[in-house]
Amino acid sequence: MTAIGAIIGLLLAVLLIIKKISPALSLIAGALVGGIVGGLPLDEVVVAMTSGVKDITPAIIRILTAGVLTGILIKTGAAETLSNAIIKSLGEKQVYLALALSTMILCAVGVFIDVAVITVAPVAISLGRKIGASPSVLLVAMIGGGKAGNIMSPNPNTIVAAENFHAELSSVMFSNIIPAIIGLIVTVYIVVKLVPNKTVIAPSTINDTEEDKQLPSLWSSLVAPIVTVILLAMRPLFGFNVDPLIALPVGGLAGIICMRRWTMILPSLELGIQKMSSVAILLIGTGTIAGIIKNSTLKDWILNLLSQANVSDTFIAPISSALMSAATASTTAGATLASASFADVILAAGISATWGAAMVNSGATVLDHLPHGSFFHATGGVCELNFKERLKLIPYETLIGFVLAACSTLMCIIFN
């Protein structure tokens, strides 16, 4: 089918998402229309759409089981304990580093970036009052840390990129550790200083203290992420493969046992499944349009454009992922579309599966924060920013994502 059909399908999906129609349904509608406009018979359009979903089914299953870890970290208060410990240990003098590091670690252990920001935001606003920092600056620090943690996490975007490239999840996570650290440093010591600091008094509805909450201890809160990381590291360290399907829920269950919060197992599982179900449904819609793109000549168009611009094949991964994340305003959907559509081309260029997935994962953070996505509104809302104020932060977020993608690509050029 023609590239025009795929482009029209993507544009239609974006338009429907902007109109507040369900992203999954918007992507399915875009895939259907794109396939028909692209010249495929209706029955072949359906085959292409279902084939795209079939390709990412293994990733969807692993993402659903990852909900065990996510639900436990959030519901038990372990995520909050970890963020509070980091902020208290670094103090007010290093407030931006503390906020960025908190969201980075939360995302790195499997918490969604929007949930990480929402978890840390009340403490951030309280600290912002004391040091005279605006919510905009605080939010950029948290988002930068979250993006850095996201590219080395067992979050859905990493899982689906690794799955589509047939790479080990742990290897993809570890490959982006150095880019993540660089991204954190750039966020705290460069990008944050570029944001205009117009102090705004935060609403009194946000609690300054969390003393009334019975949070678990720091050591018990660390058990779940530590067990998960150890299990995922078994393959690269000892050649013993523990699939994420096993490692993520086992780590979560070990954590809840050590926190002695057995009564919260069912509520935690329900929360985790609820969080991951929305992602799984989004991925089904993403899979349909990925199947259409894969069967179109859009890949050839992009490759020809890169060739005419004398761009190395290495850049296919981050550029395609950045474009797809811009189209969907989602890290997960962007990584899914790029890895499902371009994995074969990237691998054929001589790039390893691990580095291909790592670059796609980092590239998906470049433009995943655009206004037609939920991340833009959720993070702006928690810091009480209006639409115009939130819109002004997009260049700073894009800069952070660009640094992450550039560092990951440079690492690939050096070590691939």
Image (spheres, rainbow, N blue to C red):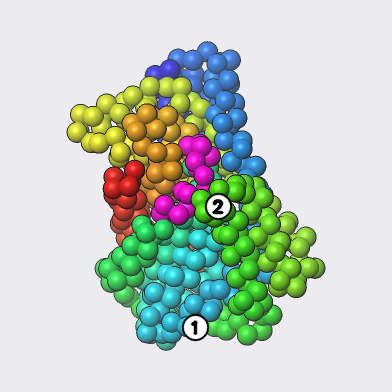
Tell me the residue at 65%/60% (across/down): 251
Tell me where the magenta segment starts and ends, as one range.
Answer: 162-176
Above or below: residue 312 compared with residue 220: above
The answer to which image quadrant residue 128 occupies is bottom left
Q: State whether residue 87 is above or below residue 388.
A: below
* Cα–Cα gap, marks 2 and 1: 36 Å
Q: Which residue is mark 2?
A: 238
- Quick one: label 1, few (<14), some, or many (20+) residues within 10 Å? few
User: Quick check: 381 above or below 368?
Assistant: below
| Image x and y of residue 192, in percent | 32, 69
- Main structural element of the magenta stretch: helix, strand or loop? helix
**Which of the marked residues, 2 or 1, is nearer the chain's N terminus?**
1
The residue type indicated by label 2 comes to: Phe
The residue at the far front in this view is: 238
Q: Is residue 166 magenta?
A: yes
Q: Circle 1 is placed at which residue position?
A: 88
Type of amino acid under label 1: Lys
